Image: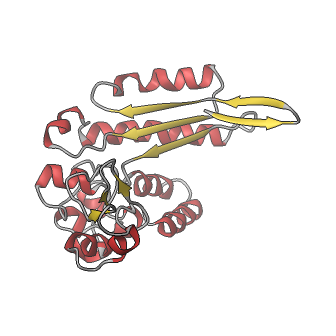
Amino acid sequence: MQVVQILGTIILKVGLRLSLTAHTVQGLPEIFELFEKEKLVKLYISHLNYSDAASKNFALETVQIRESMRFVIQKALTYMNDNSFTREIVTGNNEADGPFFYLLMQQEDTRKAKSIYERLSMTGGNSSGVRLANIDPLGEVHPDPFCRGISLGNVRQKPFSQIWQTTDHSFVVSLRGRKTKFLGRCGNCRFIDLCGGNSRARAFAHTGDWRGSDPMCYLTDEEISKK
């Protein structure tokens, strides 16, 4: 919810937030119906970003994710063509959404697709360990809020600036060398500049290796191929 004050009048801008899981995906169309009926201004859809193997049972299969994101993108494009009301659709915790959007737009408008690619390249996708950090209640520094299984140091023992700038931690070095350090599908993906390797927390939970592939990337092998 966003509060805006204009000439003494307080306006509440209300939005919706949905975590997309195996239990909530069936309600996605109804969420959009509510979003439209109540004329809300923002809908945030978060993919499940898990850091332990047990939680992956709540995650969607890649086919389901792909179908859901196709639905979301088509809705967003419809809103863009409606000048009568401004709406904002945001997805998070799955950087494959960007390349998927780009691939869909390539089929409809190559000029717009090129613009989307350039914007995605500027942001670089997942920024864990680069522009994003997390300090937990005990002072432990993590690459992001989900990578709780790895600590880069503790701010009670050393200043954050020293912890963050060190090159002694192999995981930090690995994160900041995204283009060459990943394994499997992520290591051979032509969209690595756009997604940044996606979720390292999910990769570790799934493969046991921080450099492994994110299991919730729903792009096909053909789509990510460098050939």
Closer-to-camera residue (1/225): 1
Q: In which quarter of the image is residue 33?
A: top right
Closer-to-camera residue (142/2): 142
Q: x, y percentage for residue 80? A: 65, 43
Residue 76: in sight, yes or no?
Answer: yes
Q: In the picture shown, does residue 210 fall above or below 11? A: below
Q: x, y percentage for residue 227? A: 28, 73
Q: In the picture shown, does residue 67 fall above or below 193? A: above
Which image quadrant: the N terminus?
top right
Q: Residue drawn at (24%, 73%), measured in percent from left and top?
A: 174
Q: x, y percentage for residue 165? A: 36, 76
Q: In which quarter of the image is residue 196?
A: bottom left
Closer-to-camera residue (84/104): 84
Q: Residue drawn at (46%, 24%), measured in percent from left and top?
A: 29
14 relative to 113 in the view: left or right: right
Q: x, y percentage for residue 138? A: 29, 50
Q: Which residue lies furthest to the bottom in this view?
A: 167
Q: Residue furthest front?
A: 157
Residue 227: in sight, yes or no?
Answer: no
Q: In the picture shown, does residue 33 fall above or below 15? A: above
Q: Which residue lies furthest to the left in this view?
A: 208
127 relative to 186 in the view: left or right: right
30 relative to 191 in the view: left or right: right
Q: Residue drawn at (34%, 67%), measured in percent from left and top?
A: 192
203 relative to 129 in the view: left or right: left
Q: In which quarter of the image is residue 154?
A: bottom left
Q: Residue drawn at (54%, 61%), measured in percent from left and top?
A: 116
Q: In the picture shown, does residue 5 fall above or below 36? A: below
